[in-house]
Amino acid sequence: MAQTRTGSNLIWNILSYAVLIVLALLSIGPLLWMLLTSFKVDDDIVTRTMVYFPTRFTLENYIKLWNQSGYPVLVINSLVTTTLTVAICLFTGTIASYAFSRFNFPGRTPLMLGYLVVRMFPAVLMIIPLFIVMRNLGLFDTSLGLAVAYTSFLLPLFVWMLKGFFDAAPKELESAARIDGSTRIGAMFRIVIPIARNGLVATCVFVAIAAWNEYLFALMLTSSTGSRTWPVGLQLMVGEFQLPWGMLAAGGIISILPVIVLFALVQRVMVAGITAGAVKG
Amino acid sequence: MTAKFDRRSVLKLGGGMLAASALLPHQAFAQQTAINYWHTFTSQSEAAGLQAVLDLFKAAHPDVAVTPENIPNPEFMAKITAAVVGGSRPNVTMVSSERFEDLLAMGALSDMTDRIAGWERRGDFDDKRFASITKDGKSYGVPGFTFVDWGYYRKDWFDEAGLAAPTTYDEFRDAAIKLTDASKGRFGFGLRGGPGGQNFVVNVIEAFGSPVKKEDGTIGLDRDIVVKALDWYAGLLVKDKAVPPSAANDGFQQVISGFQTGQTAMIWHHTGSYQDIASKLKPGVEFGTFAMPAGPATRVARLAYAYNCITNDENADAAWEWIKFWGEPDAAVAFLEKTGYMPASTVAAQDQRIVGNPMYKAAADTLGFGIPQPSFPGAAGWAQNTVLPALQQILIGQATPDQAADQIIEGLAAAIA
Amino acid sequence: MSRGRAMAALPPPRSTWDAINPLRLLGELSETRYWMYLLLLPSALLITAIVLFPTVYGFQLSFTEMRLNRPAGNGAFVGLKHYQRMLADPIFWLSLRNTAVWVTFSIVIEFVVGLVAALALNRNLPGGKILAVLILVPYFLPNVVAGNMWALMLDSRVGVINDILVRIGLLHEYKAWFADPNTAMATAIFVEAWHSFPFFTLLIMAGLKGIPADLYKAADIDGAGAFAQLRLITLPMLRTIIAAAVILRVIGLVNSPDLLLILTQGGPGRSTQVLSLYAFQNAYSDFNFGYAGALSVVMFVLLMLFAWAYIRLSKVNQD
């Protein structure tokens, strides 16, 4: 019995490695190509016969990009907007999804659907009225305004996802705390949220990435002298009368660097969460 | 002319759900008047050209501060629409001729007729330059620079085959077929069937003898001629096989890189891409330029002007100073030096850098016979969303020229209804 | 937080401090029967303030004549005119069909690949952490970059994918993937799936951590195989997370034309024309906001029906 289980485990491990390595290559291959492209001169990109490795290694694409796009300002704007978005979601969304997960109250299902509904109306048509709302609130062309606009469609995502993680957290510990005399809010902050923290982190990562990469609202609700964000700056390089491949590749590389750094940090937190979870289990 | 669709009517439409709080009154304490300028310049050379004009303007007009705002071209109309409807228009906007009628209809543009009439440099501009920014006798902008339709051809290949640059559609097609050599992966013509290719279809239809907008102002197409034109143009791929099979998805980048890498012998574009081509191929040796060939009925080459327009009544005097400045020869030549774009002013076009360069001869010739694009509200949308898909359907074998012609004609009727 | 616990756990007698202590007040508030509504209030207010007017406005547009480049007659109520036109509009039906293909295939591929990757990563193999980061990276790319990068790699002249496929003999000449109606949609779906499958991986991975290990141990003892465990333990435990992820992704796929705008713009010959793209074109190149509004309402209603049916069928909301 034990013998066969080890055997099947080995098979599954090998299969898992195979799957993971194939997927990792698929995921990373295009990025490596982008990295290579970003170091190429134009003549090595637009060629009749494929040039795999740059014949002349150049940093020109990065230099041009840096000078032309105003990268530092745009990235700071992106960071501010993303942070604000995550913060708003965290404060208002966590308690909302807790309510959806832990209480059965009249109107729960319609309300949950209601949160989804706001994401369902196509952004294309919402832009102009949203523009007017932002102007009237005095939030046009501010990072806060953009973050609030993002919140309107990312908060539902946040609430729905987090509800899933809260649902998965065992209710027994919470009941035990309640029996010990803890208030509901006490149980929420001391028991449920710590248990679901992996989910909380994962959800925040999603919201952060979505806010970081968003383009259409950022274009419409900001200006270049105000709170314009990085994806808009990137799009501006895809001009009509130039071949921007090298610069675009460089832009891609420097736009994922901050995200990868963030993710590396989050990974540590998640790993810590897993170990703690094992003790709990 | 007041816009019917302004912020207030939108709010009314919204049922007054939001209190229409008045915008803060504009504060103009400083002596310097600040205006913003929306444009679609993207490339490094364009950015440098704009900067050169801005620097000159700053020296000449210290009392006006211009803040440029670049808008990605594909989303330009979305952004300007929101600004007009939402009541936060820029002071000055760069308007390409194909966008004029739509913007005018939505009330984005201010009448500049009197200012232009009283302008000391008005004499530097041919009347024709204002044609595609004028409607019912009123002008709404001043041309800044122009793109002139022309073609590029591989001079080395033409010489080798004993061919001259084509001057008619027949010569063009013959050359395309002769220079196609599948074994070498060479094609005669890089047809733009992807994004942006719609305008050339309209050109071919008109060159075959069916103008979209007739002289009396009526809009409509002659079905037989449209069929013939589509059959000829798409036939370059489906019958003559003189076009790369990727044509249906080839936009600007693909068409240019096809020519640069020696896949195609000829392409159609305009003067805006000259420097890009010349960065890869040797002008006058490896490639040459030719004026658009004449069709069976007429010769169609477009002059597409970029106009600067006043789009906000506030600070209109300062805006006018900035717009006028583009007509100064110094500014126009500084812009030309950085970008290679043709100036709109006749005086500036006499500059040695243009007259002295034989490669620009085709463009100079075209300035003589070139015409503006057919212009009416909805024209750009019709070309993009009806004409282009119809062409693509022939290219990929999903429609016959007859079926495509029907789509184009029905789409036109719907667009102007 | 530990102080909060001490406070909350303390029995009355009340000092002055106790009467105004916000933590205690919150604690008491949390025992009232309106507590859950109070928890929902901030987010509900925020969403309503931002979204209510634009959404109602969009609905109203769909019953209104609103062609920005034909100002005469704008704002008039036209009843169901736009909807009637839609019924007779072949491009609408084509876009609807393409949308169904686009969403169905994208979501199935993304979910299956995402699930498999998450399960494999959850085995905590040596080196798994590095592989996890590599696998998740595509999702970090903005659409602008992902779209243009694939456009370059799939290019029929300078694309590296064509070169590789020719070298290993799968193709004998470079292929223009987006110029052929038979491959354009499939290729676009591939790019979309490549970009978004990590969404499922990350979510399911986080969900898997929450499943108690005892359940699997018990199943092992009962002799349940790997597939039975997946079916009987893993998937049911992840039910809500999967439901949320699927619904949210479907909404994104239906509503966002970003990637297709970069790759095909609906071409060749409308073979990748989807509803979101069609609404975008109607609004911002034909300026027919009334018709674009009606298209948006239809998309909205279809998504509502989907979400409602999915929630009913998967019994997500029952405990």
Image: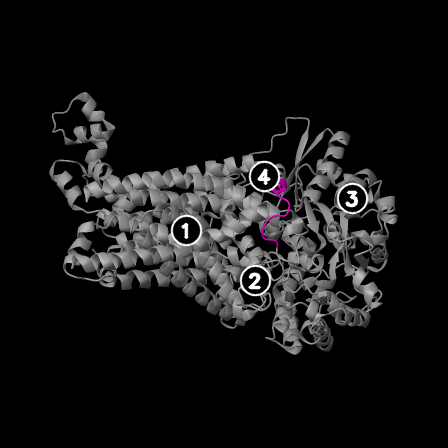
Give the CA separation, mark 1 to mark 4: 34 Å
Circles 4 and 3: CB distance less than 8 Å? no
Closer to viewer: mark 4 or mark 3 = 3
- Label 1: element kind: helix
Residue plotted at (14% across, 24% down):
C14
Number of numbered discs overlaid on the protein picture: 4
SS at mark 3 in the image:
helix
Query: In this figure, which residue is indicated by the disc labeled 1?
Result: C135
Asked if badge 3 and badge 2 are on a common chain, one would say no
Give the number of the disc on residue B336.
3
Q: Position of residue B91 (x, y in %)?
A: 66, 40
**Residue C65 visible, this angle:** no
Looking at the image, is C112 positioned above or below residue A33? Answer: below
Which chain hosts label 4? A
Q: Which residues are magenta?
A: A51-62
Q: Farthest residue in the front direction?
A: A3
Q: Is residue C234 magenta?
A: no
- Kindly indicate whether the residue at mark 2 contacts the one at mark 3 (C-beta within 8 angstroms): no
Residue tagged 4: A224
Q: Which residue lies under the disc numbered 2?
A: C162
Q: Secondary structure at mark 4?
A: loop
Protein image colouring: one colour
Q: Chain of mark 2?
A: C
Q: Residue at x 68, y 48 (%)?
A: B109
Image position, residue B355 (x, y; %) = 87, 49
Tell which subunit mark 1 falls on. C
In front of the other: label 4 or label 2?
2
Give whichever of A251, B314 is nearer the camera.
Answer: A251
**Amino acid on which disc 1 is placed:** Ile
